[in-house]
Amino acid sequence: MAKDSSFDVVSEVNMQEVDNAFQQTTREISQRYDLKDSGATIELSKGDKLFTINAPADFVSKQIIDVLSSKLIKRGIDLKAVSWDAPQAASGGTVRVLGHIVEGIDQATAKNINKDIKDQKLKVKVTIEADKLRVSSASKDALQTVIQFLRDQDYGQPLQFTNYR
């Protein structure tokens, strides 16, 4: 019997690149004419994987999110990796916006991916392991088909394919 080939479906974010994009964003906020004296700030909590934007108005917070998004794209981070909360009123008439960095595949998404792969009627075996999925099959062509299928789907977070053997 042929040895099974496999790969892992994961959702990971390079936190060093996120930190670099954050540093560039803070530098641009302090230098840009329209944002310099606005009192807007952005913070990154690496432990909580959380961006916090404090701005005098919703419009300014959206500008900062646009600046951060452009820096993340340049650094190769998918924008689906950050989910933004609705703006909240903060003290002094300011606005606070929280951005959560999404990492790992939660159980509901993993079950959804598993169901979608099984609906393709390919001869592959999918196992859910904590925050990743392992897809294995005797046919490498079937694995390639699954990878292409998953790339075409949208699960609300970026997916990477690792440990292809």
Image (cartoon, grey):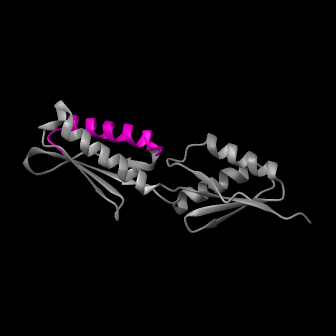
Residue at 18 percent across and 35 percent down: it is 35
In magenta stretch: residue 63: yes
In magenta stretch: residue 32: no
137 or 119, nearer to the observer: 137
- Report the span colored magenta: 55-79
* The N terminus, quarter of image: bottom right
Q: Position of residue 133 (x, y in %)?
A: 63, 61
- Count every numbered label the image shows and give the total: 0
* The C terminus, quarter of image: bottom right
Residue 151 seen by the camera = yes
Vertical comparison of 3 with 62: above or below:
below
Residue at 57 percent across and 50 percent down: it is 159
**Main secondary structure of the magenta stretch:** helix
Q: Is residue 147 left or right of residue 48?
A: right
Q: Position of residue 124 (x, y in %)?
A: 77, 57
Q: Is residue 61 left or right of residue 92?
A: right
Q: Position of residue 39 (x, y in %)?
A: 12, 43
Residue at 60 percent across and 59 percent down: it is 111
